[in-house]
Image (cartoon, rainbow, N blue to C red):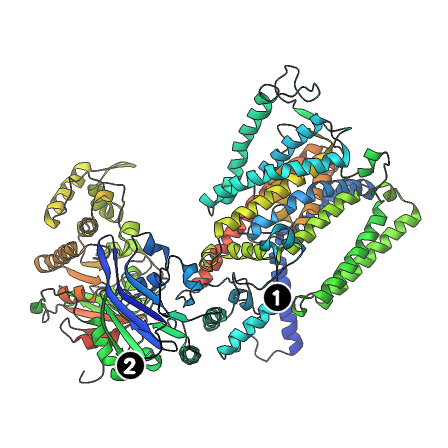
Amino acid sequence: MQSRPMTTSETMLQGRMASARSFLVRNMVTIMFLVLSAVGYKLSGMTPFLFLMDIVARLSRNAFLVLALIIPVMAGMGLNFSIVLGAMAAQAIVIFVTHWGFAGLPGILLSMALVTPLAAILGYLTGSLFNRTKGQEMIAGLILGYFAQGIYELVFLQLVGGIIPMDNSTIIMSSGVGVRTTIDLTNGLKYGLDWPGQYWGNDLLLRPTLPWAIIGMAVALAVGIVIYQLRVDKRQRLGSTQLVLAGIGLAWACWWSVQQIQARTQINWIRVPLLTWLVIAGACVGLHFFSRTKLGQDMRSVGQDRHVAAVAGIDVNRVRIAAIILSMVMAAWGHIIFLQNIGTFSTYGSHEQVGLYSAAALLIGGATVARATIGHALLGTLLFHTLFIVAPAAGRQLFGDAQIGEYFRVFVAYGIIGITLAMHAWKQILQRRSVDQ
Amino acid sequence: MAVEPVLRMKGISKSYYGTKVLDSVNLSIMPGEVHGIVGENGAGKSTLMNILFGMNVIHSTGGFEGSIEIAGQPVQIKSPLQAMALGIGMVHQEFMLLPNYSVTENIKLNREVLKPNLASRIFGPRLQSLDYDKMYADARKALKRLNIDIDEYATIAGLPVGYMQFTEIARELDKEHLRILVFDEPTAVLAESEAAHLLEAIKEIAAAGIAVLFITHRLNEIMEVCDNITVLRDGRHVVTKASKDTNVIELAELMVGRSMEFAGRKQHYSHKGRPILEIKQLTVDMPGERVRGVDLTAYEGEILGIGGLAGQGKIGIANGIMGLFPAAGDVKVAGTPLPLNNPSASIAAGLAFVSEDRRGVGLLLNSSIEVNIASGAMFGKKEFIKTWGPFSQVDQAAVRENAQKLIGELDIRCTGPRQLVRQLSGGNQQKVCIARALTMNPKILLVSEPTRGIDVGAKQLVLDTLRRLNEELGMTIVVTSSELAELRSICSRIAIITDGRVAGILKPDDSDVNFGLLMAGQPISKGA
């Protein structure tokens, strides 16, 4: 292209530009949402206090559910829309636990213990179905969700109170048959994990204020990075640029938090559900650990190429079933976390959006149907729910009608799933073409 | 000899649905021996290896006859896993690698080094952690034995093909108790220098006491590395010779042989009309059958054969001319240039094609015979169609009449023109394909693999049909086939395609040696 040879700095600059461009292309979806969220926040005219309070609640409510989608992606099964079944299992168990009168943290732990075998069985059945519909797992999962809805409704509208005895006027409809359309968890499982102390009469136990929580997280992250750098192979260590960026980010977060504490701002009124966050952090660490075990490696092998994995002697079907079981159990736990935070749920509707919303959040974080990481899940949850919060307010400010912002958000949330799936298919076609040449 | 053979296969026979593909083949290999297996496509090489590996395709079709002994012990190999446990390794023709894994992760695929942890003590061994340090060390060691410098941390995607091939070999070498290593056409995808390196590596592996089975059709390579050579032809064991007692020419002759005797048709050799199909520098991008620059001319009224081994590009030629795969070059039909990559133009120019993929591309299996016969002309030439203003309708009467005429002419055995094509035998389905091509009144008929998947008796009928079309109607026919014997029985000239180019054009009565040499990519030496 050029007549004279390029100098080293020019080549480096070109390389930088090329890598910057590929970075932009790869993270197109995430960047677009980052911009949308920032603009939306600006337009909404919300105070940082209101926004942060909402986002803290929504993050702790939804992050675990999004994490439940990672393992099936690893095993090459795409977005597991069948987590709706896990959510149904969670609701079923929560209804019974509420009926038996359990509350608080013990109630939550009991629910999680009871839902595990149920979700595992559902996961086994779903995994077996997926093994007969290889390559069509996403649509099969979606339809399976609608199918299961019918069975769920049969059980809770007709059988409970009729065949399955349940004498509880707050849960059962006045006719004596069928569960009411809304279940109130107040004085029951509500905030069982978020405010564990409430059950024992200490409202503030394990609920630090947001600034202190941020400082604690920053310190924990810094320690985590140091340990990671020391323990991991030198080829997998973080680069100096990444370390400097992480350092600046953490230092800024601490500085901002200290300022808030000193100025006694409203931010100090926001309290973080520490136990929930620890559970989510535990899930992240667990997922990372799992990906480096034999079973995790088998899943990644199967995810890349079923045929090659089978020739190497991996029992492909068994690994795929294991992936769905793990995902299903995590989804059930995630939905219990979701329900205890909301405190009330619609018996026949609360689970419906779980699959689509979690998938949308994961995709917005930069994941594809072939690759999803913990980072994608957390970032995606943050961005997706930021849009949830700011879109109605922005719509009201812009058009005088909150509903328009809401339309826009729904349009974007579903649109993004469609676009991401289409983009993935398109990329695969391009790759196949380049392999042929 | 005092040493026990590490592998002995005795009297191996195998039939698929009544067709015998292997007939009492014997094979015996000593530790440290490099044993070559040569044969044409369909000679039974891959079936023999499938039996050795206990592949499911063998057991789901009724098993096989004969016995296998490993180091003197009779064994029943029921699955690939069992074969691996017995110390049999295989380097596949197409790569069995995961692109997003490192070289190490691929070498240790499903044989990862594990260490226990808290979770595995509670939930079982499947949750043990991977011991990456040990895995990298093992990979390094295996690569070192191959004497090749590949970064064991590198990701497979983006490595040169040669490195991928060596990664596969390293994976087999890394297996403990490896006793027998099978190479299935390992040099097919390699550049020359890489192939040379591979042959060196094979010698090293054998020197370490591992028996090597080397399958290829490149005869010079087999002469270079093998101690003994077994020739298979049509499922039969022709001969096993020490490589020092034979030479490339003899092997070529043994490999091709004359398996089926068809009546030759010498009267047609002299026949040469004007050139009707001129192909210059044709390249076709057909995956697996790439054409890399073919010059070929067909003369009016002849049957031109296109032969060669699978994967060399012979199938690609007709597909390229018909516009079914991306093609470039100059093609003239009766002197008029043919626009490429445009199937309608090819049909309009008077070409008709009987595809090698009979059930996939060639036929509408769930439609009737008459619809199948008429469909080509219907879509390609708008025949058999009545037009009413903007609407059009199939002319049922014409379709029926045409079908009945051709059913009679080609002797298609069926219950009538309304019978579904799915219910016909392979040979009759093939005749329907030919009938459809004829309905389009072609100047030139291109036929690919006309006898693939057809039983022996029906083969003769299909070939006779082609010959009759040529003799009685004077139709120019270009036949592509993997079966040399059938090309030699009906063609006036046979072009052998090797590596995407014309290696040479032979007469049907040329010697077996010449056919074998051209197919193996060797020049024909003078006086042979």
Q: What chain does badge 2 belong to?
A: B
Mark 2 and mark 1: span between their CA atoms?
44 Å
Q: Above or below — where is B35 with respect to B265?
A: below
Q: Is residue A211 left or right of residue B316?
A: right
Residue B169 in picture, x, y percent from top left:
46, 71
Towards the viewer: B374 or B127: B127
Q: Is residue A75 left or right of residue B528?
A: right
- Image quadrant where residue B186 sits: bottom left
Residue B153 in picture, x, y percent from top left:
58, 70
Report the number of discs: 2
Q: Are marks 2 and 1 in contact (CB under 8 Å)?
A: no
Residue A171 in picture, x, y percent from top left:
68, 22
| Residue that numbered label 2 is attached to | B243
Secondary element under disc 1, as helix, strand or loop, is: helix
| Quarter of the figure with the N terminus of chain B | bottom left
| Quarter of the figure with the C terminus of chain B | bottom left
The amino acid type found where label 1 is placed reads Tyr
- Neighbours of disc 2 within 10 Å: few (<14), some (14-19), many (20+): many
Residue at the image point whose x is 22% and y is 83% from the top? B525
First along the sequence among labels 2 and 1: 1
Residue at the image point whose x is 63% and y is 70% from the top? A14
Same chain under badges 2 and 1? The reply is yes
Q: Above or below — where is B172 with respect to B453?
A: below
- Neighbours of disc 1 within 10 Å: few (<14), some (14-19), many (20+): some
Q: Is residue B240 left or right of residue A74?
A: left
Q: What chain does badge 1 belong to?
A: B
Q: Residue furthest left?
A: B267
| Residue that numbered label 1 is attached to | B132
Towards the viewer: A369 or B330: A369
Whether residue A338 is visible, yes or no, is no
The amino acid type found where label 2 is placed reads Ser
